[in-house]
Every structure is written in structure tokens, then in C-alpha cells.
Amino acid sequence: MTQHKIFSSGIEHASFVTSYQILEKAWNVISSSDEGIVSNDGVGLCWKLYKEQSSDLTIIAFEASDLVLSSNPKEKNFPQFEFLYSKNITSFSFNETAVKLFDDNLQKLDQLKSE
């Protein structure tokens, strides 16, 4: 029986990523000022689209600014992320929009998990 490779290591793709300068291009899009931002008012999420004219490269960078600092996930009503808290990691930030998206789709995710 032949097993197909599902995952690959970064080493296999490293030469492609570095030769094509994809990381540098992605960072330039992420760190650019407000150029090309598409904002979703009231959602707390915006994104930027970059298309390179000379190739098929398209970079989409998402930005969400509503981080919530938590020293204990139960305090902030994020019990599903309690596993992140430990003696060594005493505080971290959540993206409130991402958590809301997760909560809103939790039932669908559970269904997919059981399939």
C-alpha cells in the first residue's frame, strides 16, 4: 500500500519561499500604512489586498485590533481557551472578533469534528 504524503516540512519549501521573496513581500503588505485597506465597520476586522502585476501573486493581510488581555480565560468568558493558561504563561491576548467567530460557529465545528 502506498502512503501519500499529506504534510511537508518547511525545509522542503524554504528555497521557494526565500528565492521568491514571499516573506518580504508579505511583510511589506502587512506593515504598509493604510494603503488599500478594506474595512468592515462594526466588525473590528479589516483587510488589505496586494496583487503583483508581473505574476499571479496575491497577498491578503487581515488585521483585527480588538485584543483582550487575559490573565485567566475564565474571567473574560473564554473558558474554551483555558488550556493556554499555565504557570509559565500567565497572561496572553485574545482577538475578541476571532473568539466571537469561533463561538458563533462552535456547533458547526463540532459537527465537522464528529464526521
Image: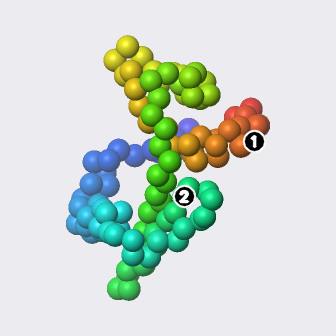
Q: Position of residue 39 (x, y in %)?
A: 54, 68
Give me the residue at 61% from left, 57% from top.
43
Q: Quote the CA–CA distance across marks 2 and 1.
A: 22 Å
106 above or below 40? above
Q: Which residue position is annotated with label 1?
A: 108
Question: Where, quadrant-wise, is the C terminus in this rendering?
Answer: top right
Give me the residue at 75% from left, 41% from top.
108
Secondary structure found at label 2: strand
Quadrant housing residue 23: bottom left
Give me the residue at 59% from left, 65% from top.
40
Secondary structure found at label 1: helix
**Viewer-closest of 87 and 4:** 87
Question: Residue 43, can we see it?
Answer: yes
41 above or below 102? below
Kindly identify the amino acid type of the residue bearing the numbered disc 2.
Answer: Leu
Residue 19 has which mark?
A: none
* Residues packed near mark 2 inside 10 Å, few (<14), some (14 to 19) or many (20 plus): some
- In the image, is 86 to the left or to the right of 23? right
Question: Where, quadrant-wise, is the N terminus in this rendering?
Answer: top right
Give me the residue at 39% from left, 71% from top.
34
**Viewer-closest of 3 and 48:** 48
Q: Which residue position is annotated with label 2?
A: 45
Sequence-wise first label, 2 or 1: 2
Kindly identify the amino acid type of the residue bearing the numbered disc 1.
Answer: Lys
- In the image, is 36 to the left or to the right of 88? right
Mark 2 vs mark 1, foreground winner is: 2
**Viewer-closest of 68 and 48:** 68
Question: Residue 112, can we see it?
Answer: no
Q: Position of residue 101 (x, y in %)?
A: 64, 46
